[in-house]
Amino acid sequence: MVYPFINVWAVLAGTLALWVLGALWYSPVLFGKIWQKEVGFKEEGVTKASLFLVFGLSFLAMLFMVWALNFVINSHKPEDVSLLRGLQYGAFSGFFFSMMTMGVNYLYQRRSVTLWLIDGSYMVSGLGIAGMILGGWR
């Protein structure tokens, strides 16, 4: 197997962008209050969690996602890799893999459509942004 080009800095920047978007997405600035209600979290439950562990492991999981997205984007000829192509691959992956997987799980868990839209659209947006970074940073 031939391994595609890996720009470690772009992977780290894409991961950081995905993580920062999540911090905003799930904050009171955007969807935090609605998300907490849909999940059933109370404010004290959120603050009692081991935030270092939650944030650290989520960053690691995002690093793996962005690293895998790098393989998808950069498995093409270099002249076919661009910022727009990265956005397309990232958003495509976010929608068809992440959001649809969540949809199946949320159906069985009897979760709300609102929660699915919040969580799923975060992954579509976040992986789209990470894909732009990977495709544009050559």
Image (spheres, grey):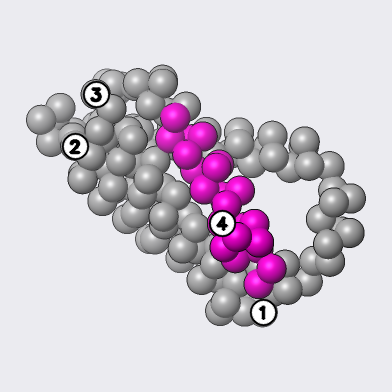
Circle 3 or circle 1, nearest the eye:
3
Q: Which residue is mark 3?
A: 138
- Disc ID at residue 42: none
Q: Which residue is mark 4?
A: 25
Circle 2 or circle 1, nearest the eye:
2
Does residue 8 appear to the left or right of 87 in the view shown? right
Q: Characterize the magenta stretch by its predominant secondary structure.
A: helix
Element on which disc 3 rests:
loop
- Looking at the picture, does residue 65 appear above or below residue 25? above
Q: Residue at x 21, y 44 (%)?
A: 85
Q: Which residue is mark 2?
A: 82
Q: Amino acid at mark 3?
A: Arg
Q: Are marks 3 and 1 in contact (CB under 8 Å)?
A: no
Does residue 96 appear to the left or right of 60 in the view shown? left
Circle 3 or circle 4, nearest the eye:
4
Q: Which residue is mark 1?
A: 110
Q: Amino acid at mark 4?
A: Trp
- Looking at the picture, does residue 120 appear above or below residue 10? below
Crowding near pointer 3: few (<14 within 10 Å), some, many (20+)? few
